[in-house]
Amino acid sequence: MRTFSKAAAARLFLARQGLDRPRFQPLTRESLERCAAATGGLQLDSINVVERAHRLTLWSRFGAYDAQALDAWVYRDRALFEYWSHAACLVAREHLPAWRRVMADYKTRHTGWSGWLRRNAKAVAAVEAEAAARGPLKGGGFTRPKRRGGGWWNWDATQHALHYLWMAGRLGVAARVNFEKVYDLASRVLPEVEPLPAAEFPGWHLRTSLKAMGAATEKDLRMYMTFPRQKAGERGQALKALLKDGEAVELRVEGAEEPWYALAADVPALENPPEPSGTTLLSPFDSLMWHRERVVRLFDFDYKIEVYTPAPKRRYGYYVLPILHDGRLVGRLDPKNHRDRKVLEVRRVHLEAGEERNADSILQGTAETLKSLASHLKAERVGVTARAAPGRALRALL
């Protein structure tokens, strides 16, 4: 059994995530599709303190780009489509056959819906019929019956039905208007493809996750692309099949007790992983950060988003972005985009323990990165209000 260094596993992970040379290549339709396919998805989130999560994830890799072009590639050209991967994501169209399998099996595999569907069959049929007659239609534009009680997430029957029909592949997200979903019949949004055979899906899911991570433990494989929830033993059986066929191999990573796994084709890349260089900031919802425990193991970086932490208890700030510098997670930065004043504010800067000796290089790279982010956001200047020493040094570089 081969043994590899933690640094090699970390570097390959960065390369697979498109972060070994961040902001080096421009965003094009082709690079967008490659990125979504390589990572398994671009996570969506409604928080807009700096920029929407998927747009920030793309900026981290490609630098400033035309947001209108991105929306056209996604919602006009259908280069990507919205579905659930790790969470709600934009996923690659080339992965549609696999996700069509999940859609086709959604009702039977996600049995928590069964009782609700029996009680609300008329609401589901009415929502689907309204989409057919009036779509594309914003979620808030569908006819809503009178609310009866609270229910799951306090959603009314219409909202429930929209979510179910989307997950079951009967509706698709045709567009977003001010981040609100616009629904239409899936047949008008997605191309017709045959679902991946059910027996092949666990292997596809495992293979896709391994490619995205380079090398991974069993827990990494469970926590990276967390959807769909698989039956007990299903992932293990798929892994055994890949190992038996020689498509995957078991290996060791220095300092780790548990076994790691990689695709056999990726072993040469582990032997000689790309040397990372460059600086960028990461969204809290970046796919590199999806499994926080893995980030601790590979980068010695313990990250927690503090949006839901009461202000007095926050350690680093409200919407903190990890600083990636030359392949290391070296610090944290708390920014806010003041759209009305066209100012990108940096409220706090923190360097990880031991990185003070690299402060000049890190802060120089961070300053250049902030200028790129400001350009992407159409901010006219970067203002640093952080009071600690790294903030003062950063202010002098801008």
Image: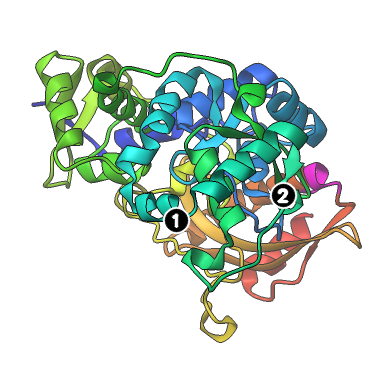
Which residue corresponds to the image point at 61% horizontal and 33% vertical from the top-left?
172
Q: Nearer the viewer, residue 95 or 6?
A: 95
- Of pointers 1 and 2, the one earlier in the residue sequence: 1
Which residue corresponds to the image point at 32% horizontal and 39% vertical from the top-left?
108
Q: Is residue 250 left or right of residue 365?
A: left
Q: What secondary structure is marked by label 2? A: loop
* Residue 314, image x, y percentages: 53, 78
Give the labeled residue for mark 2.
142
* Residues rendered magenta in the picture: 374-378
> Mark 1 or 2, which is nearer the eye?
1
Q: How many marks?
A: 2
Q: Residue 119: which disc? A: 1
Q: Quadrant of the N terminus?
A: top left
Is residue 375 on the magenta stretch? yes
**Alpha carbon separation for disc pair 1 and 2:** 19 Å
> What is the three-letter code of the residue carrying label 1?
Arg
Q: Magenta region, mostly helix, strand or loop?
A: helix
Local packing at callout 1 (Cα closer than 10 Å; few below 14, some 14-19, many 20+) is few
* Residue 163, image x, y percentages: 54, 47
Picture quadrant of residue 278: top right
